Image: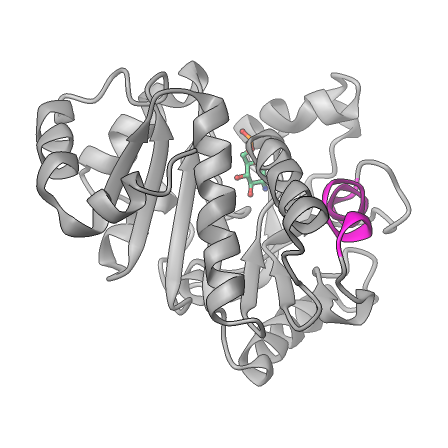
């Protein structure tokens, strides 16, 4: 796991977008794993700008999103389908048939999870998976106590996630669907490359627990310590509780891969 710290949220979004853009330029038919949440909004805005101003070409890319609420139709404004269209897909040159999210309206939700993994496999596996970090350490909707080998599946959301995401449902926790479909931790771990982006003071405590360990079933993201190509990007607010900060600063000064990332800064 490598960690790159950015001065602020804006630089973090721009750098994350630039790393995604680099992937698309190097491999135009990339299979991208995408995420939702507030952290991703500015990243997608940066990607849209790169499409509009610099012709970044998404026409051969295929995308698989991490998750979707159960029971929300894709036209529902609170669905992740709607989120992705609003923040990214409708602004760039990607065909709808190349974009995938689990179908929260599927008649057979168990089968939908299995089919989702199968579709990822058939596409050739994910080249680059983008992740956010939930305040309880979830990745996708893999809540605490999820198996590190879990596959894409139907899950029940934790009370913390219902609370955290109630803001999208006018602050009404009872309006948040209790179930979701999510890519499994095992599925995420098969991605060839992973970028986890973490921003803001509200994430400082969970970033510390995730990065500094111990690896635990209580924090799903700690499974990423077993991935051999995972880059964590965080802003200084999110990094404010780290006790290993001096080590990370030292690595940033001397690690060639991190130096290369530094050269990509806006
Ligand atoms: C939701 C998503 C996660 C995302 C998390 C963080 O719970 N299912 O995939 O990482 O939100 O969201 P935010 O960036 O809004 O803090």
Identify which residue is drawn at 71% across, 64% down.
100
80 inside magenta stretch? yes
- What is the total number of numbered labels drawn onto the structure image? 0
In-front residue for pair 127/174? 127
**Is 147 placed left or right of 18 in the picture?**
left
Which x, y percent locates residue 167? Answer: 70, 20
Q: Residue furthest bottom?
A: 122
**Is 7 placed left or right of 62 in the picture?**
left
For residue 210, what is the image quadrant?
top left
Which x, y percent locates residue 198? Answer: 42, 32
Question: Quarter containing ligand 1?
Answer: top right
**Residue 92 at least partly seen:** yes
Identify which residue is drawn at 77% across, 55% down.
104
Q: Is residue 103 above or below residue 214?
A: below
Q: What range of the chain is rendered magenta?
A: 79-92
In-front residue for pair 149/36? 36
Q: Residue furthest right?
A: 75
**Is 77 placed left or right of 15 in the picture?**
right
Q: Is residue 113 above or below residue 173?
A: below
**Residue 133 at least partly seen:** no
Identify which residue is drawn at 17% across, 36% down.
252
């Amino acid at each position: 796991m490598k960690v790159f710290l950015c001065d602020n949220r804006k630089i973090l979004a721009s750098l994350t977008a630039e790393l995604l853009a680099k992937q698309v330029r190097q491999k135009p038919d990339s299979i991208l794993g995408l995420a939702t949440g507030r952290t991703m909004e500015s990243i997608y805005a940066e990607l849209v700008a790169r499409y509009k101003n610099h012709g970044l070409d998404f026409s051969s890319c295929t995308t698989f999103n991490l998750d979707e609420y159960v029971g929300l139709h894709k036209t529902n404004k609170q669905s992740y389908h709607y989120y992705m269209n609003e923040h990214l897909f409708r602004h760039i040159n990607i065909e709808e048939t190349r974009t995938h999210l689990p179908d929260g309206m599927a008649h057979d939700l168990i089968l939908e999870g299995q089919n989702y993994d199968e579709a990822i496999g058939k596409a050739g596996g994910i080249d680059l998976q983008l992740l956010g970090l939930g305040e309880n350490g979830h990745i996708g909707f893999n809540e605490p106590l999820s198996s590190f080998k879990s596959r894409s599946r139907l899950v029940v959301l934790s009370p913390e996630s219902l609370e955290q995401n109630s803001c999208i449902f006018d602050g009404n926790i009872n309006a948040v669907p209790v179930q979701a479909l999510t890519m499994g931790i095992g599925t995420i771990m098969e991605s060839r490359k992973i970028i986890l982006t973490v921003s803001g003071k509200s994430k400082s405590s969970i970033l510390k627990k995730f990065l500094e360990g111990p690896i635990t079933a209580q924090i799903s993201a700690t499974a990423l310590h077993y991935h051999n190509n995972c880059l964590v990007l965080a802003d200084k607010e999110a990094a404010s509780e780290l006790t290993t900060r001096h080590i990370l600063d030292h690595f940033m000064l001397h690690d060639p891969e991190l130096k290369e990332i530094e050269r990509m800064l806006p």
